[in-house]
Image (tube, rainbow, N blue to C red):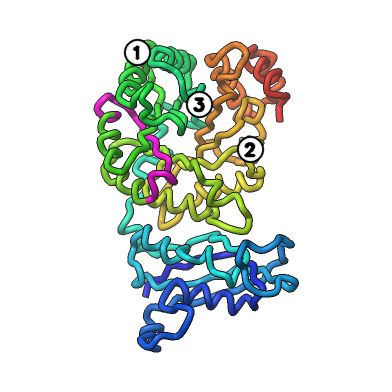
Amino acid sequence: MSVVTADYEIETALPPERAAAVMASEQSSGTFVSVARETDELKRRFAARVTNITELPASGRPPLPGASGDWTDVRRARVSIEFPLDNFGPSVPNLLAAVAGNLFEIREVGALRLVDLDLPEEFAAAYPGPQFGWDGTARLTGRTSGPLLGTIVKPSIGLDADQLADLVTELADAGIDFIKDDELQGNAPHLPLAERVRVVTGALQAAADRNGRMPMYAFNITDDIDRLGPNHDLVAAAGGRCVMVCVNTVGLAGLQYLRARSELPIHGHRTMFGAYSRSPQLGIDFQVFQKLSRLLGSDHVHTNGLSNKFYETDEQVLASIAAVQTPFLGGYGAVPVLSSGQTAALATRTYQQVASQRLLVLAGGGIHGHPSGSASGVRAMRAAWEAALEGVELAERAEQVPELAEALDTFGPPR
């Protein structure tokens, strides 16, 4: 019988064995009291089973609201629970109802995080995963090696069609590999998606005619589910090469709906992820999010970047990048997307610590905030990463590339 194994980190005032038993019962055949038809045979087939409990040092944090018991003797543990696949089948929405569901609300725990999932092969048969991954993305951008260097349209919102076309032209002529809409830019009345697609694809094609290569542009097509297909088709018909969706706002089922219809790479943005993961006491770990995002079809998965402007530590970011690069279910290769506060000054340290070129590195302010303009920001990022790959000190390369010298003066010394 196939099973899904879910790993949790919990804190409880109860013996961990008792809390884990409540978790397994609540999310499978049991409830808060014994019921007549919960027979031994039914439990044998359908009850979730606790397979491992490893105690961990207590965190010292107060419990979540409503936790039961005496918290002067709190215990923390990593708990593994097996769920029979027969309970829900290879369906991600129903999987989450089982392995997450009501667990975050039960009184028996004062902290609970879903930290990992091990899925059986039936999910690989049900979901095809990323369609393009690294190889397809690199091919469409015209690069034979990485990293791919990109940016986000800044200001995030407010540019009119002519201003957007001018910005895209400047970036393309400077040699950028990838441009994306900000997650705040959807189908806004001031610049609807159809108009944005028209002006951006026109600017990109004109740049390709001049330069011989076309950057990839990820159009944010996030919308109600019934609009995802038409929005994708609009981009594809205009010659666009990538679509972007905010995975947590369209939902995993929305991502799967798009993947089933998509002819283009899907840039999976993780906006709202902090709501699920920022608290160490509650939520869903990035390890789980990235597996499901890849399974449902994201070719590119945001991991955050080193020295980012958000809450994650460098150690967490490196673990996230490694997670996206780790095969599961026999593959499901996606591209880690490094973003948030990225600048030319971070190139060498990022390359040394990540030890991979198969990355998509996005710099928003790190490119557009260059004192000599966005094109100079692109050239500075390119020079920094070329130096990193060649093992040349950034300060040394800056002596030869004025744009890099300006970037290091603006964003700080090499770090």
Q: In percent of the image, x 36 and y 71: which residue is there? A: 87
Please say if the residues under marks 2 and 3 sit with CB atoms less than 8 Å apart: no
Q: Earlier in the sequence, mark 2 or mark 3?
A: 3
Label 2 sits on what residue type? Leu
Q: Position of residue 374 (x, y in %)?
A: 54, 16
Which region is colored magenta? Answer: 235-252
Label 3 sits on what residue type? Thr
The residue that disc 1 covers is 206
Q: Position of residue 42 (x, y in %)?
A: 36, 84
- Helix, strand or loop for disc 3: strand
Q: Is residue 329 above or below residue 321?
A: below
* Residue that extends furthest to the front in the rendered view of this protein: 66
Q: Earlier in the sequence, mark 1 or mark 2?
A: 1
| Quadrant occupied by the N terminus | bottom left
- Helix, strand or loop for disc 1: helix
Answer left or right for 56 relative to 186.
right
Label 1 sits on what residue type? Ala
The residue that disc 2 covers is 306
Q: Position of residue 216 (x, y in %)?
A: 40, 27
Residue 379 sits in quarter: top right
